[in-house]
Every structure is written in structure tokens, then in C-alpha cells.
């Protein structure tokens, strides 16, 4: 069975390969999307993913990768040539997770739409300075989801019967009446002059930009069953491929016939890891040919071909396992040092091992003269292997 530690929630394309950071060990890595071969970057200077944190969204610009921390505290800049990281502070830590609605680039600027606080953080990548645009969306307290069409970022707010449109080219904001509220919005995409908005329970709302009318498709509705909730969708081959949040099925809606197909062609040993509360699909990236979904809970990488909507699965393969272990140990030591400096005394099982703990924890003189039980245990463990 594929090692659970390889899971990752987001990815981006760098030199035709997927760049990601492992969820469990915080290791920056890359994957060849054709062969599935996974290799690891050397331990990057200044990089240390905080305990319990992960990456909310991730983008590529040249030889640098820009990532948003789930906590909302920072933008992390990965310099893949210099193998070092820089943290740029953000003031978006409103919740433990789910702090962002959009992460868009135009020229040398990133526009980070906070889900809360009614603000946009604009980051100049030339200087790494962040400025805020506050109160741009009248009456909005929370955003549900968004999508982009050219320079326009379409924004779906919570508990409001409107849709917003922010123009990245001139900073102008327009608000349009919908006539009804969109509830439980999870994801939105732009298709041929229309905004398709996926509801948590499979309802798809359609906002026609030309005639400014809202309609909906109910063929995917799951009668508001939480265990049948949906999460993400992509448009490929005149089809909407709708992926589950917690549901078991991938559903494919043919927009030309309105027929719905349930996908069944999984690899023989395919599985979802049992991680309570985690959505099965979340982050994705794309190149000219495919969409790639991050391995958030599954043991295969999902890719969807744009031209015909066909699904295929890539089995990951860690090429140099020894290198992975070496880098993981370096990061463990860095984390251990950070814990010590912060005065922390508790550690997660997957972050430390008893041998490393015994070796690194300093002993007081009055304790060192007595029997060191930890050292004895460690010696017995070594002798038994």
C-alpha cells in the first residue's frame, strides 16, 4: 500500500513537473506527471512548516513558487534555484483554515482575496511588499468561492443575493443582483460566457454574464446528505467532471445531453485514506493538456484530459527513498530545535523518534549521574535490529 506520508493538498507546475509540499512531513518535492516519479528538494534554508499548518494555495512565477499558509499568516516564497524560503506576513488569520477565496496573478502582482474581512491583499513580487484594499465589496462579510475570466474575478458571497466582479486591470468592482442567495457554494468555473457554481450538495448554478440571469441544474443533487457532498469540478470535452468532498462517487455531466454518468474505472488497488473531516479533492493545477488534482486523500494522482474529459490515474513512485529519509531527518532536527527554543515539551509521534530524543535532550548533572532509562531503552532497540 502506498505510504500515507506522500499525501499533499495542493500542487503547481514547475518545468513540466508538479511541485508540492507533503502534508505529513512538510517536505518540498516534485513529481513527473507521466511516470509518477517523485524526488525531493534538499532542505531549504529558512523553511519549516509550522505544526498543524499546510498550504492553502500555490502558484508558480519563474523559478519561484508562492504559497499561502492555511493559517493565513504568511505567503511562503520558495526559491527553487537558491533553495531557500522567505516568509511575507499577511493579516488573514481569521480561522484555523479556509482563510482565502482566490489567489490570482496579474503581471508582477498577486491578488489575494481574503475569505473574511472584506479585503484584498496585493503583493508586489518585485519588492515582496503587501498592501491592502479594504471594503471593496459593499456589505460583504464572507466569500464562498470565486473564479476568473480574463482580468475579471467573479466572487460569490455568503448570505447575499448578489455576485461581485473585480477587474484586476483597473481595480474596479461591480455588483450584480441575482434575485436569490446561493447557499453552500464550493467551487466556481468560467465556461463560454457563463459562471458555473457548484453547491456542496450537487446543485450547479449558472450565471449568464451576457443576459445577467441565474439558472440551475438539479441533476446532481444529493438531497443535502453530508456524506454525499461534492467539492470541485472541471470542464473538459464538453463535460463537467464533479469530484466529491466526502461522497463516494465522481459524477460526469454531459452538458450537451444533460446526462449524468457515474465514474467506475478506478485502478484495482485504488483507495481513499481514512482521514476524518478532510475533503477527498481540493487543490489542482493544469498545463496545456491536463488538469492535475493533488493527492489529498487518495493513493493515486488523478489527471483529466482537457480535450475529451477522460480520467487517468498515475501511481506515485519515490525514486530515492534514502534521500527522502535524510531530508526528513534534517527537518525533524530543525523542528526539534524550534520546539526547544519555544519551550514546547510535547511532540507528535511522526516528528520524533526515541533515539533522536535521547541523543538531543540535554541532561542535567544531577540526572546524568543516575540511570538514564531512555538511553537503556534506545540501546536495546538498536541491539534488536
Image (cartoon, rainbow, N blue to C red):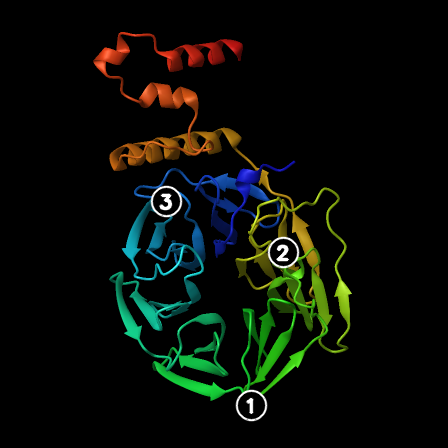
> Is residue 45 positioned above or below 17 on the image?
above
- Residue 316 position within the rendered picture, expressed as x and y whole percent measured from the top left: 60, 42
> Is residue 1 positioned above or below 188 on the image?
above
- Please name the residue that numbered disc 3 is placed on: 50
How far apart are labels 1 and 3 at the CA level? Answer: 46 Å
Please tell me whether mark 2 or mark 3 is closer to you in this view: 2
> As drawn, which residue projects farthest toward the left?
365
Q: Residue at x 69, y 66 (%)?
A: 222
Of the pair 385 and 42, the residue shown nearer to us: 385
**SS of the residue at dot 3?**
loop
Q: Residue at x 50, y 54 (%)?
A: 11
Screen quadrant of the N terminus: top right
Of the pair 368 and 47, the residue shown nearer to us: 368
Mark 1 burial class by Cα count in 10 Å: few <14, some 14-19, many 20+: few
- Please name the residue that numbered disc 1 is placed on: 210
Q: Residue at x 52, y 48 (%)?
A: 8
Of the pair 27 and 222, the residue shown nearer to us: 222
Compare marks 1 and 3 and give the one earlier in the sequence: 3
- Residue 338 position within the rendered picture, expressed as x and y whole percent measured from the top left: 30, 36
**SS of the residue at dot 2?**
loop
> Is residue 106 positioned above or below 248 on the image?
below
Quadrant in the rendering for residue 227 = bottom right
- Residue 70 position within the rendered picture, expressed as x and y whole percent measured from the top left: 41, 55
Compare marks 2 and 3 and give the one earlier in the sequence: 3
Q: Is residue 280 visible?
A: yes
Of the pair 256 and 143, the residue shown nearer to us: 143
Q: Residue at x 52, y 54 (%)?
A: 16
Mark 3 burial class by Cα count in 10 Å: few <14, some 14-19, many 20+: few
**SS of the residue at dot 1?**
loop
- Please name the residue that numbered disc 2 is placed on: 246
Amino acid at each position: 500500500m502506498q505510504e500515507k506520508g506522500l499525501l499533499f493538498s495542493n500542487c503547481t507546475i514547475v518545468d513540466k513537473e508538479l511541485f508540492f509540499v507533503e502534508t505529513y512531513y512538510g517536505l518540498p518535492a516534485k513529481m513527473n506527471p507521466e511516470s509518477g516519479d517523485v524526488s525531493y528538494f534538499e532542505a531549504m534554508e529558512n523553511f519549516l512548516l509550522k505544526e498543524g499548518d499546510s498550504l492553502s494555495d500555490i502558484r508558480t512565477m519563474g523559478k519561484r513558487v508562492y504559497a499561502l499558509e492555511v493559517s493565513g499568516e504568511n505567503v511562503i516564497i520558495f526559491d527553487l534555484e537558491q533553495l531557500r524560503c522567505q516568509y511575507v506576513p499577511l493579516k488573514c488569520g481569521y480561522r484555523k483554515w479556509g482563510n482565502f477565496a482566490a489567489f490570482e496573478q496579474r503581471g508582477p502582482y498577486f491578488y489575494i482575496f481574503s475569505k473574511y474581512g472584506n479585503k484584498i491583499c496585493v503583493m508586489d513580487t518585485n519588492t515582496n511588499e503587501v498592501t491592502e484594499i479594504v471594503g471593496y465589496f459593499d456589505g460583504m462579510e464572507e466569500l464562498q468561492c470565486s473564479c476568473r475570466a480574463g482580468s475579471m474575478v467573479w466572487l460569490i458571497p455568503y448570505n447575499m443575493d448578489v455576485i461581485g466582479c473585480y477587474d484586476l486591470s483597473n481595480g474596479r468592482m461591480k455588483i450584480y443582483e441575482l434575485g436569490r442567495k446561493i447557499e453552500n457554494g464550493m467551487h466556481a468555473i468560467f465556461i463560454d460566457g457563463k459562471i458555473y457554481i457548484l453547491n456542496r450538495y450537487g446543485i450547479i448554478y449558472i450565471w449568464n454574464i451576457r443576459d445577467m440571469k441565474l439558472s440551475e441544474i438539479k441533476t446532481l443533487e444529493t438531497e443535502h446528505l453530508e456524506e454525499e457532498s461534492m467539492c470541485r469540478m472541471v470542464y473538459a470535452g464538453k463535460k463537467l467532471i464533479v469530484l466529491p468532498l466526502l461522497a463516494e462517487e465522481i459524477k460526469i455531466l454531459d452538458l450537451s445531453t444533460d446526462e449524468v454518468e457515474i465514474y467506475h474505472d478506478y485502478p484495482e488497488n485504488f483507495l481513499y485514506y481514512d482521514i476524518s473531516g478532510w475533503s477527498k479533492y481540493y487543490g489542482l493545477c493544469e498545463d496545456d493538456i491536463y488538469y492535475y488534482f493533488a493527492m489529498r486523500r487518495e493513493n493515486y494522482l488523478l489527471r483529466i484530459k482537457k480535450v475529451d474529459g477522460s480520467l487517468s490515474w498515475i501511481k506515485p513512485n519515490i525514486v530515492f527513498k534514502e534521500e527522502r529519509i535524510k531530508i526528513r531527518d534534517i527537518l525533524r532536527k530543525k523542528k526539534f530545535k524550534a520546539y526547544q527554543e519555544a519551550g514546547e515539551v510535547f511532540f507528535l509521534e511522526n516528528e520524533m523518534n526515541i533515539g533522536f530524543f535521547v541523543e538531543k535532550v540535554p541532561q542535567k548533572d544531577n540526572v546524568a549521574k543516575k540511570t538514564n532509562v531512555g538511553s537503556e531503552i534506545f540501546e536495546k532497540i538498536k541491539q534488536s535490529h
